[in-house]
Image (cartoon, rainbow, N blue to C red):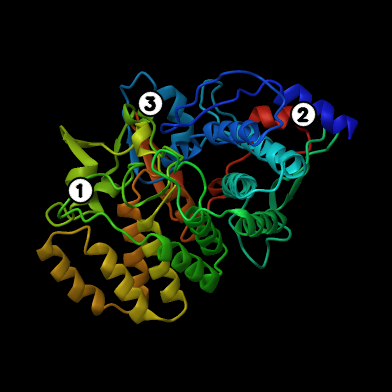
Amino acid sequence: MKKFSKYIALFVAALAVTSCDDYLDITPIGSVIPQTLEQYRAVLTTGYATYPEHKSLTAVRTDELTMNEFSDELNVYKDIYTWKDSNPDRITFTFQYQDLYTVIFYTNVVINEATSKLAPSPEKNQLIGEAYALRAMAYFDLVNLFGKPYNAATAGADKGVPLALEIDLEQAFVPESVGVIYNQIIADTQEAEKLINLDTQATGKNYRFSKAALFSLESRIFLYQQQWQKSFDAANKALAINSTLVDLKATPVFATKFNSKESILALEDGYINGLKGTSYASPDLIAAYSKTTDLRFPLYFLANGSRFRIQKGGNDDQKCSFRTSELYLTKAETALKLNNIGDAKTTVLSFIKNRYTAAGYTQLETTVNAMNAADLTNFILEERHREFAVEGHRWFDLRRTTQKEIIHTLDGDTYKLIQNDPRYTIIYPANARLNNPNL
């Protein structure tokens, strides 16, 4: 206990007590060892604010982007773009392994300390429930970056990431299996379910977990585990709270905005400004859209000579981790896996009705209703490709499905990620391996 308290004193004493009246408006007003509900809320707010922008880096590895060879910032992305993971240039951006563990540290402080220190109240339950949910999300991202894709047959042996649930200076952080990490993620979401009592968060505070956000996270977790019924059920629970979609025929605005009626958890930026200036939409991404009937095309892209700039992302008002669109497409995918092709078609049609012109939808309605299961699967996955362009879904979707071959060209050279390439799992960053030989 002395060791634990010393660690808390060393690290938590430096935390800033913060307020969040506006969207991620974090203002330090002092440094204390937390004792009150308000102070523990400040600790968790710091955890939320620390959540990294790693999904923007995953986009560089996908088939979504082409790099601008003349950009001054190209060198920090080049080795990610060419999948040169083993010996990258020292200036290459590093996937934020340590930042995700920093988030976990803050959640552990709340889970381990606030539970015993604070008097019972609905606010205490909400706070600790959010901490469990945020820890689950951080581990989910860690294991999907640095662990093998989930395979029920091999998850118990596949190498995952270290597990840190306590604050212990002497703990040896040895990677656990993918199966152990997923079990912990699910255990954390189950604890969060017992505690979170807000269906939704007010706009401006919707970077915090709510019941809708937790159910959305659970739906995504079970989707990646191919637990189709559990993913379907979780999506339905979230949709029971918020099922609203932005109709682009009536309102041509980004559904990713934190104040969008689709917003469920507004925490991450999938396409940061530095990358916006260094990349274009790839020909593969542009080819995925109908330029005449898909209302997302003129919203998402802006012609720049023979190439297209991507207009999504890059601003705090487009932070987006979960939104209702994902729930519809997950529900459609899982319904199909559960052999309910009628429900899958109804669900995907109710979604795309809001994304295409009236004429385009009428044509697609006929096409979708005539699809067999294989064609409908491809259509749903391509709708994810189109809808979630540069939002951080693509790399993870490719990992859990086809692990397709991707070819990138840069300065006249060709680079290839072959199908099922081992580089679909990112190696631990060099500084993490240096600091922890157990990795």
Question: Does the image show residue 86?
Answer: no
Of tags 2 and 3, which is closer to the observer? Answer: 2
Name which of mark 2 and mark 3 comes first in the sequence: 2
Q: Secondary structure at mark 3?
A: helix
* Pointers 3 and 1 in contact (C-beta within 8 Å): no
Looking at the rendered structure, the secondary structure element under dot 1 is helix
Is 47 in front, or is 139? 47
Q: Amino acid at mark 1?
A: Phe
- The picture places residue 410, in percent across and down from the top left corner, at 36, 32
- Secondary structure under tag 2 reads helix
Image x and y of residue 380, in percent: 34, 65
Q: Say which quadrant the C terminus sits in.
A: top right
Dot placed on the residue nearer the N-terminal end, 3 or 1: 3
**Circle count:** 3
Which label number is shown at residue 8?
2
**Label 2: how many residues lie within 10 Å, few (<14), some (14-19) or many (20+)?**
some
Please report the residue visible at 61 percent of the width from the left and 33 percent of the height from the top.
Answer: 38
Alpha-carbon span between mark 1 and mark 2 = 50 Å
Q: Which mark is residue 274?
A: 3
Residue 227 visible? yes
Residue 110 higher or lower than 151, as above or below: above
> Quick one: 279 or 298, which is closer to the camera?
298
1 and 2 marks in contact (CB < 8 Å): no
Q: Amino acid at mark 2?
A: Ile
> Can you tell which of label 1 and label 2 is closer to the viewer?
2
Q: Which residue is mark 1?
A: 297
Classify residue 434 by image quadrant: top right
Q: Tell me the quadrant of the picture where the N terminus can be found.
A: top right
Give the CA separation, mark 2 to mark 3. Answer: 35 Å
